[in-house]
Image: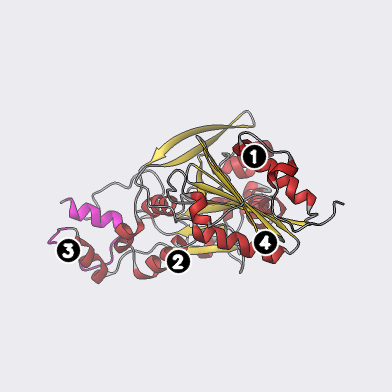
């Protein structure tokens, strides 16, 4: 092992000349090896705009800094800790090397705290649609127009709104359960909630929509593995959406779909799931009591949310806020309220195909 040295970076002794931007990674690696560091940590994060040439100023007085057409890089040298920072396309990558893992995490936190938070984007959120063909996965990508949660929240019953609000606050892959279960009758707003969730999580999580859930869970394993191994290179987590999949989680699921339920649970918190940065969102119109108890055991679900109809007061408030003078005398789903606000008789609006 190389002898440990805490001396400052020495570009000449390391043989780095000419365009230093080319050697940022090599400089970090060479110094890391020279000092015999035994620990390394890294993290990526979406950030706000950093103007060209600003990175060095944000970091204070880095030992090395460079600007290229593709982005910026800098190295901060604390002697016993070396931190490499690179930014490109509103993403930051921070790598720290040293002897103490906890210290490295603290240094990464400190660097990320200096970088601007990502600005809200009003662009479409990309979604990947998956289908099976001859045991392999076919993919189609499209833009999903964003919906802001703060603009939609009033359209949900209080209990549902509170639970969704908590879910929206996650800003990274949770350490606990990775299964998200949404259940409720059609027309209660699951589609809009999904669009809001995709927009709210867009910085750290991508959306993958499985068009054939039964085939994904109970078909050839090669299809599922293709989907899991074919994400983007953005280093973001992924949210797999399985629509109207209550039958895959029913009390008799093992009899109806063979090993489908076991595969689903393994994907959520078994070895298969733990080896990937994947969350699973399953929507169903089935009452919770009809679902297999293994699905909603404690610790398995990140969130288990029932989509309820709005009570009379909530429904009347929603109608008034949306410029409708009508009132109601019984609970209404969000779809029914849209129908009333549009001047159609209550219940005349056909339910759309989709999440409900």
Hey, which residue is sitting farthest front in the picture? Answer: 12
Name which of mark 1 and mark 3 comes first in the sequence.
1
Residue drawn at the location 67% of the way across and 61% of the way down: 104
Q: Which residue is mark 3?
A: 320
Q: Which residue is mark 1?
A: 229
* Other-residue count near label 2 (Cα within 10 Å), few / some / many at <14 / 14–19 / ≥20: few
Hey, which residue is sitting farthest right in the picture? Answer: 1
Circle 2 or circle 3, nearest the eye: 2
Name which of mark 3 and mark 4 comes first in the sequence.
4
Q: Which residue is mark 2?
A: 166
Name which of mark 2 and mark 3 comes first in the sequence.
2
Residue drawn at the location 61% of the way across and 34% of the way down: 19
Q: Alpha-carbon distance for marks 4 and 1?
A: 30 Å
Instruction: Tell me the chief SS of the magenta region.
Output: loop
> Is residue 340 found inside the magenta-colored segment of the image?
yes
Relative depth, front residue between 320 and 14: 14
- Image: magenta residue range: 323-342
């Amino acid at each position: 092992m190389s002898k440990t040295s805490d001396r400052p970076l020495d570009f000449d002794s390391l043989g780095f000349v000419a365009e230093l931007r080319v050697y940022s990674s090599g400089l970090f690696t060479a110094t890391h090896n020279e000092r015999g560091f035994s620990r390394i940590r890294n993290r990526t994060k979406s950030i706000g705009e950093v103007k060209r040439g600003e990175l060095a100023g944000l970091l204070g007085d880095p030992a090395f800094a460079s600007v290229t057409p593709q982005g910026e890089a800098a190295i901060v040298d604390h002697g016993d800790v070396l931190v490499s920072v690179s930014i490109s396309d509103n993403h930051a990558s921070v790598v720290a090397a040293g002897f103490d893992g906890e210290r490295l995490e603290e240094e990464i936190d400190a660097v990320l705290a200096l970088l601007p938070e990502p600005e809200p984007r009003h662009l479409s959120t990309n979604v990947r649609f998956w289908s099976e063909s001859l045991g392999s996965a076919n993919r189609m990508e499209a833009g999903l127009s964003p919906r802001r949660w703060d603009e939609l929240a009033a359209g949900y019953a209080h209990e549902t709104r509170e639970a969704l609000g908590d879910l929206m606050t996650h800003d990274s892959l949770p350490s606990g359960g990775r299964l998200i279960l949404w259940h409720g009758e059609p027309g209660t707003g699951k589609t809009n909630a999904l669009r809001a969730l995709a927009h709210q999580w867009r910085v750290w999580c991508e959306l993958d929509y499985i068009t054939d859930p039964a085939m994904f869970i109970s078909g050839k394993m090669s299809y599922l593995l293709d989907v899991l191994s074919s994400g983007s290179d953005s280093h973001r987590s992924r949210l797999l959406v399985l629509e109207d999949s209550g039958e895959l989680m029913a009390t008799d699921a093992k009899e109806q779909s063979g090993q489908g339920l076991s595969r689903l649970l393994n994907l959520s918190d078994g070895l298969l799931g733990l080896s990937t940065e994947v969350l699973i969102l399953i929507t169903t119109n089935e009452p919770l009591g009809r679902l297999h108890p293994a699905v909603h055991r404690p610790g398995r679900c990140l969130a288990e949310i029932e989509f309820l109809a709005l009570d009379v007061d909530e429904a009347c408030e929603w109608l008034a806020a949306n410029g409708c003078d009508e009132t109601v005398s019984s609970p209404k789903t969000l779809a029914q309220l849209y129908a009333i606000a549009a001047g159609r008789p209550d219940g005349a609006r056909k339910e759309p195909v989709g999440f409900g």
